[in-house]
Amino acid sequence: MSQLNSVLLKALELSKPMQGEVKKVSSVAKEVKESIIKHASSTQIKDVVLGGSYAKGTWLKGDVDIDIFVKMNSSLKEEEFELLGKQIGLESLKQYQPYLRYSDHPYVEAFVEGIRVNIVPCYDVEKWNWISAADRSPFHTEYVTKKLDEEKRDQVRLLKKFLKSLGIYGAEIAKNGFSGYVTEVLILKYGSFQSTLEALSHVQEEKVIISTDPIDEEAAKKTFKHSVIILDPIDPKRNLGTAISVENFGKFVLAARTFLKKPSIEFFIRQEREGNANIFSEIYPNILVVSFSYRERSPDVIWGQLKKSINTISKQLTLGGFNVIRSICTTDERTEAAFIFLLESITLPSYMVKTGPKVLRKYDSSKFISKNNNIARLMWIDNEMRITTLVARKATDAREYVRLLLDERIDSIGITKGLVPDLGNKTQIYTANETKFTYLVKTAINELTTIEKIFF
């Protein structure tokens, strides 16, 4: 037996649920579905169907969610649809302390015997006549269930386990990784875990196009702007790859190359992320932390606000002369959040050089002189005949600069409006060597300073 096959057999043992677990999960799924049917007395309810990885038989050992879709009359208005969906979900799971979660529409979640159960409303529609984002899901379940045999289900499990160990599994905005459905589509496209890795390890194009059916690739490149294009077999107008960040796709490609070159079970075991201790002393003084508390909201909402806002602050830091090497945002999805930036330097020199137009450009050079004459400490013509000035910086410390942005310019720099009230005077701004930080911030700093030893 080859080393690769030996590793894959061991990985499958880690990935495939045992019979006892299958029996327990099936019992919970049956119980909850029956409870939903019992409480779904409205004539607007057309069907109750199982979905997700449980229904498709692709879930991982010790890691399963049960998704149950309540299909409603397509004539319902959005407000009625949401209200009825919440009502049925909360009543059906009443004994399990259910709570609301939010995606494009609210849905109900609870833990039943330690298993996460989601009751998701969707419209009962014909294919292509989608109304809500969840309407495709029952079609996905039907499609995958028909196409995957038991061997291919195991191949999906191997791919999921591989991605999960790399920390890039999950399409939610917090992760920007590969969804469960994407792993199933990849196996349907390439046939096996090994073939999927081999195909994607050889990707060289700027745009990656993956489709289970023949397509016009040039048309697809023009239609979809994202670098990763994975067409939904149920709806080819939809790009499943939009949720996957370029960084995470790159991690997958590099990990695939490394694994195929030297197979190891370590690729299927999530490693504890520890920062690079060798560079703590030199890097920590240049790690800027902006931590704050916020009013609780949906995880998808807060992650969206954080990711948009960290890009805004990074841009402002760059405009201020602070070179942002890497950045990361984090939240406990309850009340605590932080932005973390690795800067080239936390402080800047007191002066900076501004290079203007060439003297021969009469109008532009006159305008530059007029604009900078009062603020320039020095002004001269350089060896390229350009007018050059030396001016004092407005801010030389990144901590003071970010505080200025949040105190005086927060409404005009592009920070998400929903986050503005949370970034007030209680926001803490410090460098990683200045103070003790929370476990949340420590974990994010470790991620920011971690070397992915598994493929570097």
Image (spheres, rainbow, N blue to C red):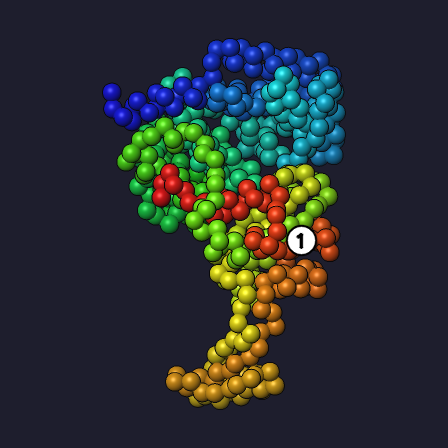
In this picture, residue 340 sits left or right of residue 144: right
In this picture, residue 104 sits left or right of residue 91: left
Query: Which residue occupies the foreground of this view, 67 or 354?
Result: 354
Residue 289 in percent (x, y) is at: 59, 53
Question: Residue 317's image quarter?
Answer: bottom right
Residue 47 in percent (x, y) is at: 63, 19
Question: Split into 4 quadrants, where in the image is the C terminus?
Answer: top left
Could you tell me how many numbered marks the image carries? 1
Instruction: Establish if 401 lies above or below 76.
Output: below
Residue 348 in percent (x, y) is at: 53, 68
Dot 1: element: strand
Crowdedness of circle 1 by 10 Å Cα count: few (<14), some, many (20+)?
A: some
Residue 68 in percent (x, y) is at: 61, 22
Write the residue at 36% across / 28% down.
Answer: 265
Question: Amino acid under label 1?
Answer: Gln
Write the residue at 44% across / 22% down.
Answer: 15
Query: Which residue occupies the foreground of this view, 131 or 395?
Result: 395
Instruction: Establish if 424 lies above or below 146.
Output: below
Residue at numbered disc 1: 428
Tell me, yes or no, if residue 358 can be seen here: no
